[in-house]
Amino acid sequence: MATKAMLHPRNQHREGYDFMRLVAQSPELETFTIRNPAGQTTIDFQDVQAVRMLNRALLKTHYNIDFWDIPANYLCPPIPGRVDYIHYLADLLADSNNQEIPRGRNIKALDIGTGASLVYPLTGQSEYGWHFTGVDIDPAAIKSAQQICQFNKLNITLKRQNIRENIFRGVIQPHDAFHVTMCNPPFHASIEQANKGTQRKWRNLGKGQSKKLNFGGQNAELWCPGGEIGFIATMIEQSMEFANQCLWFSSLVSKKDNLRPLYKILKKAEVADFKVVEMAQGQKTSRFIAWTYIKKSQRSLYINGPRA
């Protein structure tokens, strides 16, 4: 097993994929396994079906998800990197709770753009027992997420966002209180930019021209007007309206260069505090930005006090 020492210390995939265990739990994965030049068992990560089957096996083996599937051409997320976000959010909440990770269903998490895969609620609920609300603008993604919940008898709240320009509006109701929000935002500013990114990725994989990403992706998942900065800027702007209803707002930021303009927007919003948390997975470094309007002295009370 190849070591991925850069993953979060609590990440179950830190030591790489245990294919013997995965195949024992999900025998259908064996058809997709290959040997790399070093003689280790792996899969072809350029094969969409192989990646999907690996995800299914990982979710079953590590997160007790017996059924998982997504419609064709939807993002098939890499589980180790996605669950890292959850673990670092748990650390963020621990910082507001005398270094103790809060667990259980009284901890409320809001996943913006939860997607057809429902990856954050599935892994986060399994790891920490939090109650998740997943939101998406795409009816097909919500339908897929509902099927996953029904088959696995999971209590995850799912909401359809009907207005493209809205992120928190129409989702966070007056009586709601969340401890953390999370988001993997669309990172391209236009469909043309998304297509260029797709072609570049396939060239890097030595595949020539193709209209598919190796992990799939629908338009709503890949691009929005203003790109990543525009989306997160809207998120920050709307978060001001719900300043007292959430302890930490957060979003992944794919490009480090996007942080500087976001700092300026956060300062304008007069947040009480914000943090950038770096996450390293193999050769790749990712990050998320988190902000709060709650003063430091009040944060522990927010977690431990009576919540709606």
Image (spheres, rainbow, N blue to C red):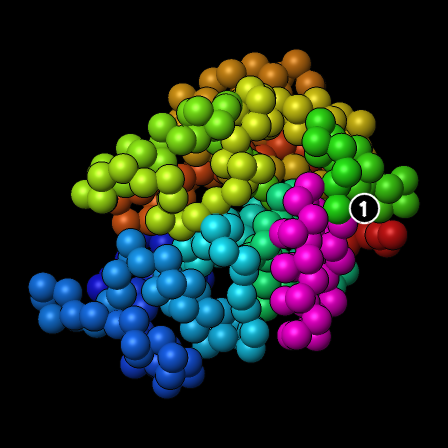
| Relative height, residue 119 to residue 179 (above, below) | below
Count of numbered marks:
1
| Residue ID at (51%, 16%) | 261
Front residue of this view, candidates 49 and 239:
49
Provide residue 204's location: percent of width, then percent of height: 22, 39
Quarter assignment of residue 9: bottom left
* Residue 24 located within the stretch drawn in magenta: no
| Residue ID at (61%, 22%) | 233
Provide residue 165's location: percent of width, then percent of height: 71, 27
Q: Which residue is mark 1?
A: 177
Mark 1: few, some, or many residues within 10 Å (few <14, many ≥20)?
many
- For residue 101, say whether it is visible: no
Q: Which residues are magenta?
A: 132-159
Provide residue 169's location: percent of width, then percent of height: 79, 33
Image side of residue 53 versus residue 157, left or right:
left
Amino acid found under the numbered disc labelled 1: Ala
| Quarter occupied by the N terminus | bottom left
Provide residue 255's location: percent of width, then percent of height: 41, 28
- For residue 286, say whether it is visible: yes
Q: Secondary structure at mark 1?
A: loop
| Residue ID at (21%, 70%) | 34
Image side of residue 54 versus residue 103, left or right:
left
